[in-house]
Amino acid sequence: MRGHRHSARIADRLALGVGLCCVGMLALLPTDRPQAQSILLSHGVTVGDRAAMLRSFRQPPLDWTRPDFDDTQWQRYVVSASPQVMKDPSGAVVMVPSLWTPGDAGLGAQGPLAGDSAGQGAAAAMSTDEPTSPSSEPDVPLRDGLIDAGLLSSPPVAAVELAGAALRAGLAATMPGALLLASPVQAKRSGRSARELSEPLLPDCGGSLFIRRKFDFSGIPGGSGSAGTLLLRVRYSDGVVAHINGTEVLRSRLPEPPPGDLPLFASDRGPSDPERYYLPVSSLPLRGHGNVLAIEVHPRTPLRCPQVEAELLALTGPRLLRGPYIERLTETTLDVTVETELPSRVLIRYGKGEKVQHRDREVESSGEPQTVHRLHVGPLKPGTLHHYQVVLLGDGQKRSDLPLQTFHTPPVAGMPLKIVAYGDSRSGHPVHAQVISSILAEDPDLVLHTGDLVERGTEEGDWDRFFSLTAPLLARTAVYISPGNHDYAIRKQGSLRLYSLFQTMFPPQLPTPSGSVFSASRVLADTVAAPAPLGNLSEAARGYYSVDVSGVHLVSIDSNQAGKADQHRWLEADLTRADQQVPKPRAIIAWMHEGPFSSGWHGDYPTAIKHLVPILQKHGTTLLISGHDHDYERGQRQGLDYIVTGGGGAELRPLKCDPRRRRCKNQPLYFANEHHYLRLEVLPTVLRVCPRRPDGTALEECQVLRLRRP
């Protein structure tokens, strides 16, 4: 089983869908109404005519995952052809989208049904009238007994309410199966009896969720015998286990079952975006008819309702996972990365202009078929419009031509250079999508991201969503990244994923015998002998780097390593080398996630002020850009012009000191608590700074900073 993956194109498919409506819709649903189950059926797949479900704090019989298990006592669903609709508390009709709808932004520009005209309109929804499962219904005699026992006798009103809240919290933690009734205060105020208002301590949808779905499987088209791979995509809360014909194929965020009949709870909250799991067909006990996909979902606490949406796909041919995305773009070179779901080879055709020409050049990946492909394209002409097209090459004659992409190389030194900077996109997907649209309209030469690209760097589903939203931009220009604290999460393990996704962008910085540092990628690219053996690149320092584009020196600083001496030495050596260039850079722009100066929620970062600001000030840095605080701030402190730009999508926060209302300790020159991005124009003698709202309108009038003389 490989790590999580998703696809942008799907040829032949085997699809099963089971699940509750999307998490984001729960706030719109009445709490006393059963929630519909959405089912997705893909074209040409024979799926059993029914699905069965059970909610319970107890584990079902051991054989519940096997095809011959008798589930006639479980809850049933009847597939209807009508769209799935629900009503919010106000009575308004709400459309509940399926997780795997082609238009879902979480799956990229090409969803699982994209390109499959025969499969259009194949989605179907379950009936919203759910029968109650006998196995999951609270024990009615027990409820009646508690009422008759006088549990609702009337001490003072406040005491009843406080005692009820405390009892709910205590029982929830120690007795997951306990019931608690409505208070007499509620009964008196509503004019209804306590019995009428009695409710279980835990929600009706509490407990674990167990789902069985039957399907037929006749093999993967084009595969030989049992060859091939199935892809299981699933979004859930909070822990999940999946079985095929009794064989466990997935366990995530769940410990092994406890002894006896105790309820099982997840160890962490589930993902907000789908995850991907690869299942080799040769390892699965599949048969032609009557297979069963069995999924169990467990909450993190008894008060949470488990939810799941899933899809099972058969993978064939060369298939795109993500990309193409540009990692580095200079005046004369282009570094492109493409990821495929199945091992394959990649070919890139490229040339001048926006159309394919007979004199276009080609570069192809070498070695054995792989899933990660990094190709270097060049030489290119500075300041010129180019095109490229990625071709995926599979076994035999199988191939897939991806759409043609256009890009322009940055201009030569001294010419105007347009840069866009933004940050803290995280899980603010609607705003982030609007920002990306405006950035595309700006048509910049390059983009700087100040970090917190995703909510949690360890979540592959979060990265899927990021690449999906930014795909049009990443294919056209380089988005240079400075790592954020959320990109490092959880426990800094997310940084490893960040560096693997952008391996070319984050070269290892290796120490030399003299104690200075150098970039291994720069040495290797220039075929210059390294001053010291390269050693293990995976153990070398990463997270900070520099790029020279059009006479501008760009320095990415890792604020997660702000206190590390290795980065301090690297920064001093890098800026010293920049000062020694002939001619000198016309501007030095540094960017990082958690900056030294801020009037926002987090405030100043003393470690950065102590260790990094003196180095930046010493070497005449033109502008320092940071994020972390979700606002826009422009100021000048300790001889440095700085800007905080953290308005790329994450939620805006209240301020500890609002400079718009009173004078703060270090009053900035301008402050706005709004989503935005930053447009920078490096002209021959000045730097124009223009903040823009997500729709492209001006947040503040453009400001002008004078450049240093070469």
Image: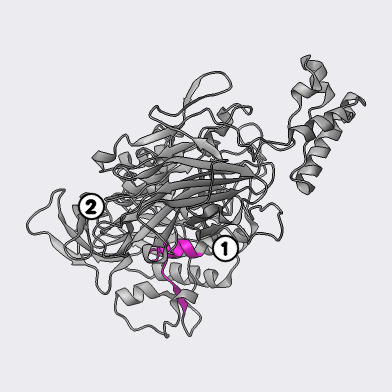
For the point 71% across and 36% down, the residue is: 138
Q: Which amino acid does label 1 sit on?
A: Lys
The secondary structure type at the circle numbered 2 is loop
- Residue labelled with disc 1: 492
Residue 574: quadrant of the picture: bottom left
Task: In the rendered structure, find residue 402 and report the number of the disc placed on it.
Answer: 2
Q: Nearer the viewer, residue 574 or 390?
A: 390
In magenta stretch: residue 602: no
Q: Looking at this rendering, what residue extends furthest in the right direction?
A: 155
Question: What range of the chain is rendered magenta?
Answer: 496-511
| Rendered location of residue 528, percent (x, y) | 31, 81
Q: What's the residue type where badge 2 is placed? A: Leu
* Point 65% across, 35% down: residue: 204
Q: Is residue 324 visible?
A: no
Considering every residue shown, the one lying at the far top of the view is 191
Residue 260 sits in quarter: bottom right
Mark 1 crowd level (few <14, some 14–19, many ≥20, 10 Å Cα):
some
Label 1 residue SS = loop
Q: Quadrant of the C terminus?
A: bottom left
User: Which numbered disc, 2 or 1, marks the residue that appears first in the sequence?
Assistant: 2
